[in-house]
Amino acid sequence: MKRWYKYIKPYLPYFILGPLCMIIEVAGEAVMPKLLGTIINSANEGTLTSGKSLGIMALMILIAIIMMAGGVGGAYFASKASVNFAADLRADIYGKIQRFSFENIDKFSTGSLVTRLTNDVTQMQNLINIAMRMALRAPGMMIASLIMAILLKPKLSVVFAVSIPLMLVSVGFIIKTGFPRFSKVQTKLDKLNSTVQENVTNVRVVKSFVREDYENEKFKAANKDLKDTGMSASKVMIFMQPVMTLIMNITVVAVVLIGSRLILDPNDGMLPGDLSSFIMYVTQILMSLVMVTFMLMFSSRALASSKRIKEVLDEKITLDDTDAKEKDKKIEDGGIEFRNVSFRYYKNSEDKVLDGIDLKIPGGSTVGIIGSTGCGKTTLVSMIPRLYDCDEGEVLVDGVNVRDYSLVNLRDGIGMVLQKNTLFSGSIAENLRWGDEDADDGQVKRMAEYAQADKFVSSFKDGYDTLLEQGGTNVSGGQKQRLCIARALLKQPKILILDDSTSAVDTATEAMIRKAFKEELQGSTKIIIAQRISSVMDSDMIIVMNDGKITGIGTHDELLSDNVEYREIYESQTGGKN
């Protein structure tokens, strides 16, 4: 509870008032059997008058109304407390995930993070709701009913010495069996969510390869796995109900047998109304234990969920700006330098994705990077905005180590158009304003023109108000690339990184986009990763990479004359024609 108190504190009145309302209900439940017993005894003795009957009836109705008010109040405050608790917790988890580095995210699958944000938080919400309604009510009802039963007939109360320990042993066994099963359910739910997320995200690939049957079988397997695990956990709950009911009924039968003998025993003189009241107290005591059992079962599942949530909240963020020395500094010139930079994605691996990179890029220059697939081009530029941190060496921007910038100021000065062009659900204008949320319509349109996107956007019925589906699936690959370029241009960055971001557009359109870069971003450093020689041949500097190393730096003509790899790429694309 210490861990979760920060989410309880803002709503402490709800957490206090809810259980107090339930105590009102408990008090009424303790009094009701006594009043009923009084009516039965009076009727049996012949002393029950209409006035007395009406008086007790009115009192019972009043108590029932008060109990109802307490129950409704308890349910209301429990709902308010649990829903607000869950909302704040979910917001914190989401905020923590937003600060995760790629290394942190790789530790959890997407499906697992979704499950933790939704289902796991819901499990804790349900526990709080139930606990607030039962945590005081169940033990309160058991204690109050036990006291009333003992005061009513101490001799008959001996049955509790057998039934209560027996029920507690059963509860302990059920909880011990159920807890690990509920942990497995959440893990299987992770797997199912990952399967669904992967399939829906890549539905076009699935359909193009006609793999629907395979994906259906894959889903069925994950779904069956979850179902079997869920049934295994549910069996514990299924088993619990008849066991509790059996113990309760045996106890009631024992009370009736013993109590009837006491009524018939002239020396004891137990009254029929007392036996009726005692039976009701027995039922309340055992029902309270059933409530506790259900609460503990919810607790076992919620504890499994809380453990998974804590794993996210306690995850140490591997990339932050806590130790940054120049937090107020912003990128001004855009000069970049790599000093003996090496990097591995898997820290225990001997193979380096980048190996001993030394490179200087002057501010305001246009730089092309070319090389074979998997040679480390994307990884190299990912070091500049600190999407990853290098294992060895250092990366500098404007002569300052990127680790010494605040992440906000560093990334705010860098525009990136990644290999995988991502758009979000919402209008085209809303997507473009990711670059500058304060940009007016004129600025948005102008940057779209530079990115050669305005023509096709204007052809849409709703223009810039056209709604994009999730991932921008209702526009073509080339259109998506141009929108992403416009978004980056709107940011007016001091460093612009284009990672193979014009591969889906024709060479004429690409040439116009490059021309726009020269006009609109004259003072910015432009880094273009490409597969086509034509995309980089006009650059101030071209970097050739192979197997994580730089194998050549120079202009197009220089590399063509003295770099074998560059010349091979050029000849393979142009047929050797100048």
Image: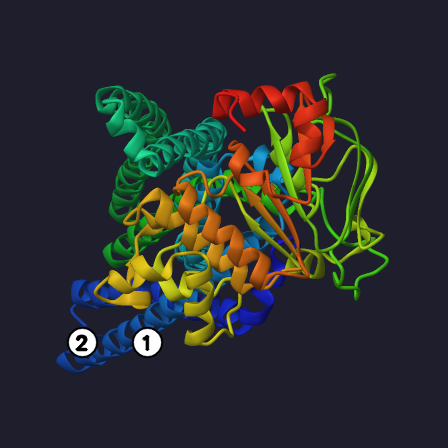
Image position, residue 538 (x, y; %): 60, 43
Q: How is the image coloured?
A: rainbow
Identify the residue at the far front of this view.
578
Q: Residues within 10 Å of mark 2 (few under 14, many from 20)?
A: some
Q: Nearer the viewer, residue 433 or 278?
A: 433
Q: Could you say where residue 144 lies in the image, as x and y percent from the top left?
A: 45, 59
Determine whether the residue tagged by mark 1 lies in a helix, strand or loop.
helix
Q: Residue at x 41, y 75 (%)?
A: 441
Is the residue 196 above or below the residue 151 in the image? above
Mark linked to residue 183: none
Location of the C terminus by quadrant is: top right
Left or right, 380 with reference to 453: right
Q: Quarter of the image holding residue 571?
A: top right
Q: Residue furthest top?
A: 350
Task: Identify the residue position indicated by label 2 in the image.
Answer: 53
The answer to whether any part of residue 529 appears in the image is yes
From the viewer's side, name the closer residue of 67 and 275: 67
Gap between marks 1 and 2 measured at Cα: 20 Å
**Sequence-wise, which precedes: disc 1 or disc 2?**
2
Q: In the rendered view, would you say 289 is above or below 550? A: below
Name the amino acid type tagged 2: Ser
202 with respect to 91 (left or right):
left
The residue singled out by tag 1 in the image is 66
Is residue 372 positioned above or below 116 on the image?
above
Q: Which amino acid, mark 1?
A: Ile
Q: Nearer the viewer, mark 1 or mark 2?
A: 1
Check disc 2 and report its element: helix, strand or loop. Answer: helix
Say whether residue 404 is left or right of residue 126: right
Percent coordinates x, y for residue 379 in the rendering: 64, 34
Q: Nearer the viewer, residue 50 or 192?
A: 192
**In this rendering, does residue 296 appear at all?**
no
